[in-house]
Amino acid sequence: MKKSFTLLSLLVVIVMMISACSTAATPAPAEPAAPAATTAPAAATEAPAAPTEAAMSEGSIAVLLPDSASSARWEADDRRFFEEAFKAAGVDYTIVNAEGDA
């Protein structure tokens, strides 16, 4: 019984390896594809509206830094870069260090 189970397990593993290494067969299309349209769609004449200042100031961003023990860069570099980017964007933000508890 044990020998049969081992042989069957080995056979299953070999079949899985062979099927994983084979290329996927792509079936040929039954009908030829329709020709592409020859005219380009009309371009939009208006640029999308920029978000209003009120919409940009809604909400806030929170950043959770992993810890200060594994790498000093979290506090020395990343916090500074995040603060600069958020201040430049004019958004409210909170940056917290998880100290490995996240």
Image (spheres, rainbow, N blue to C red):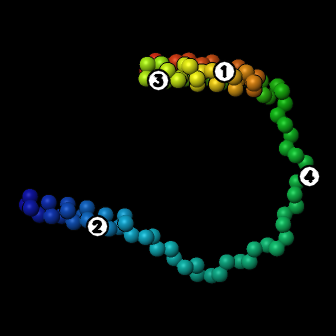
Q: Which mark is residue 83?
A: 1
- Mark 4 or mark 3, which is nearer the start of the sequence? 4
Q: Secondary structure at mark 2?
A: helix
Q: Position of residue 83 (x, y in %)?
A: 66, 21
Which numbered disc, 3 or 4, marks the residue closer to the eye?
Answer: 3
- Asked which secondary structure carries label 4, the reply is loop
* For the residues bearing labels 3 and 4, Cβ distance under 8 angstroms: no
From the image, state whether disc 3 or disc 1 is nearer to you: 3
Indicate which disc, 4 or 1, sits on the residue closer to the N terminus.
4
- Taking the view exactly as shown, the residue that stands out farthest to the bottom is 31
Asked if residue 1 lies left or right of residue 51, the reply is left
Neighbours of disc 3 within 10 Å: few (<14), some (14-19), many (20+): few
Residue 58 in sight in this render = no
Q: CA distance from mark 2 to mark 4?
A: 58 Å
Residues under labels 1 and 2: Cα distance? 54 Å
* Front of the two marks 1 and 2: 1
**What residue is shown at x 79% (from left), y 72% (from top)?**
37
Q: Disc 3 to disc 1, how far (Cα)? A: 19 Å
Residue 25 x/y as whole percent:
46, 74
Badge 1 amino acid:
Glu
- Which residue was labeled with disc 3? 71
- Is 102 left or right of 48, judged from the image as shown? left
Element on which disc 1 rests? helix
Above/below status of 4 relative to 82: below
Residue 69 placed where, x, y %?
Answer: 43, 19
Q: Amino acid at mark 3?
A: Ser
Image mark for residue 45: 4
Q: CA distance from mark 3 to mark 4?
A: 50 Å
